[in-house]
Image (cartoon, rainbow, N blue to C red):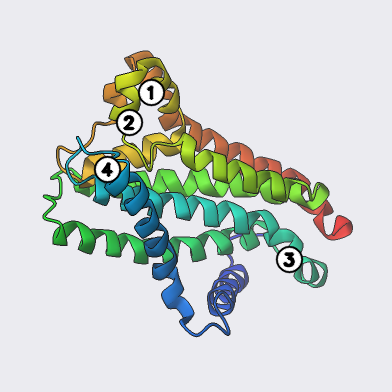
Amino acid sequence: MDFFSRKNRILLKELVKTDFKLRYQGSLMGHLWSILKPMMLFTVMYMVFIHFLRFGSDVPHFEVALLLGMVMWTFFQETTSMGLVSIVSRGDLLRKLSFPNEIIVIAVSINAMINFLINLLVVFVFAIINGVNISHYAYLAPLLLVELYLFSLGVAFILATLFVRFRDIGPIWEVMMQAGMYATPIIYPISMVMGKSPLAAKVLMLNPLAQIIQDMRYLLIDKANVMVSQLLVWKYAFIPYVIPFIIFIFGYLFFKHNAKKFAEII
């Protein structure tokens, strides 16, 4: 079946619209929560880690870097967490219609991307208000967004496939998400780790999410951060850049290999 056929494109569009409408249905603030949730979490993180614990005091505009990192992490978390349950939650649709099952996961990722782009606009406004000089390398940011999207979607494909058979994946992934946020230099600058253990900092930077967030900070916040390629020995520097594409390809093929059995198992 042609994934790009008119029928499949219409289905994808309808799934995105439906998910977007239902996301905050019944809440008083509606889709404002897409902005309010990360901003409220940012406020807590700012007060605890920047104001009181003085994290990032040696990094100019670290409050902007913190917000940017949290917004990017939220996109990854939303894409993977919602992608994880997407196939199971659409079991009735799978049994009634014949279509490429990956459309369901892609629809979830597009919804998360819409929220992410809205929040990214908030980051830009926040950066301008705080007097940040946007780097002249900012035009390269879309490349990192593509990398982030493919990595998140690849992980979502893997999780959605596993969750069909193993429901314990849900709580396990929740714990991994909580641990992952602290294992990724989001609430603290990588320079803080470099000062205490250069080896630990280099290991952290092999994480694709750490690389994407750190490089995005470098591209958008002039002179405030360093790129991952500047922290790692050249023969290792390519690793975090290649992993997202490997994960995406593997995740997609793994999903397609198991997709024929989804309707029977659910």
Q: Secondary structure at mark 3?
A: helix
Q: Nearer the viewer, residue 45 or 143?
A: 45
Specify which label sits upstream in the sequence, 1 or 2: 2
Cα gap from disc 1 to disc 2, whole angstroms:
7 Å
Among the 4 quarters of the image, the one containing residue 6: bottom right
| Residue that numbered label 1 is attached to | 201
- Figure check: 23 above or below 116: below
Q: Nearer the viewer, mark 2 or mark 3?
A: 2
The 10 Å Cα crowd at callout 1, few under 14, some 14 to 19, many 20 or more, is some
Expressed as whole percent of the image width and height from the top left, the position of residue 262 reads 81, 55
Q: Nearer the viewer, mark 4 or mark 3?
A: 4
| Residue that numbered label 4 is attached to | 217
Identity of the residue furthest to the front in this view = 52
- Figure check: 151 above or below 12: above
Expressed as whole percent of the image width and height from the top left, the position of residue 37 reads 44, 66
Cα gap from disc 1 to disc 4, whole angstroms:
16 Å
* Total marks in image: 4
Amino acid found under the numbered disc labelled 1: Ala
Among the 4 quarters of the image, the one containing residue 185: top left
Specify which label sits upstream in the sequence, 2 or 4: 2
